[in-house]
Image (spheres, rainbow, N blue to C red):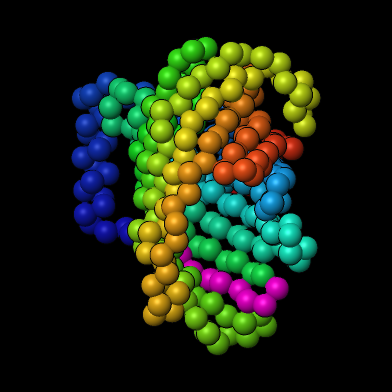
Amino acid sequence: MGSLAQAQTVAVAAAASEEAPARALAPLCDAPWFRSGSRVQMEGDGAMPMSITMTLRRATKNQTGCRAQLEVRSKSALSALMGPPVIMDQVHMVNIDRRSDSAKSSIESEHAVINAQGRYARMYGEAAFRGQGVFSYAGMDIREGGTLEGEAFESSVSLQIYPVGADKVVGSMRALYASISVGSRHVGKRQMIDTVLGRKECMPITYEKRTSLGPLMVGEEVVQVEPTLMHVTDWYCPAEAFVLRTEIRQQDKVQRIDVTGMDLDTTSP
């Protein structure tokens, strides 16, 4: 970057900050876990068991929001196949911004790096997403019987496919118009539940989540993938300012994802 235009933009922003009162940050930026080194481990059961580790690095705040590098390492597999898991690493530079006094924020990640490997092939490429809505319950006034706004995402991914152990591209996969839509969320009665981290007071927040890959390009062939509808319950635990359990119902299948660890990586920049 480092361009003259960028320098001018920074100067204008600095001048404006002296004349205008500071805006409240997006609630997600105020979460106690939004700091460099925060790490969350999650485990999921069901037809596609998974293990996910998310780590925040280089977390910073500004007048209207915050940004951080988000590293995601996941392992997932279809239990029916009983094969080795697919391992995926993602690195996103996430920007969260709120320009108004409402709870609705915008979130964006561009040129995220994706590296995935299965038994016979590996995939490497880029992804991007942007969305608007309520992305975190932390810092919000959540009351029993209340309703929270939903959120909407648009995303794209472009991957090249290689055989394991070789550098020759043998295929490609592109989903340029993927989307996720979360409906209004309804807050249930606060209750004590048993979590992997102990017995916690949490609130069930239920909603519908629709996902669509849009036209999927596999090589030069267009594949139409049916959209999915999921019924989701987030168990949000205010003391931890985090969802410690998520239950997902899709058709006749149920999956539960539990937070199994929250700590701080002290080596993180």
Image coords of residue 172 (percent x, y): 47, 76
Query: What segment carries the magenta color?
Result: 119-128
Left or right side of 33 for 263: right
Q: In what quadrant of the picture does the N terminus appear?
A: bottom left
How many circles with numbers are drawn on the protein?
0
Q: Residue furthest front?
A: 252
Residue 245 lies, with reference to residue 50, above or below; the image says above
User: Would residue 61 be seen by someone viewing this image from the given angle?
Assistant: no
Residue toward you, 196 or 101: 196
Q: Is residue 125 covered in magenta? A: yes
Quarter of the image holding residue 101?
top left
Is the stretch drawn in magenta largely helix, strand or loop? strand
Left or right side of 256 for 7: left
Left or right side of 146 for 17: left
Residue toward you, 199 or 67: 199
Q: Residue at x 53, y 85 (%)?
A: 170
Q: Residue at x 23, y 46 (%)?
A: 9
Image coords of residue 84 (percent x, y): 75, 66
Q: Residue at x 74, y 57 (%)?
A: 79
Q: Residue at x 45, y 48 (%)?
A: 211
Residue 103 lies, with reference to residue 174, above or below; the image says above
Quarter of the image holding residue 20?
top left
Q: Is residue 268 covered in magenta? A: no
User: Would residue 188 be seen by someone viewing this image from the given angle?
Assistant: yes
Image coords of residue 52 (percent x, y): 66, 49
Quarter of the image holding residue 205?
top right
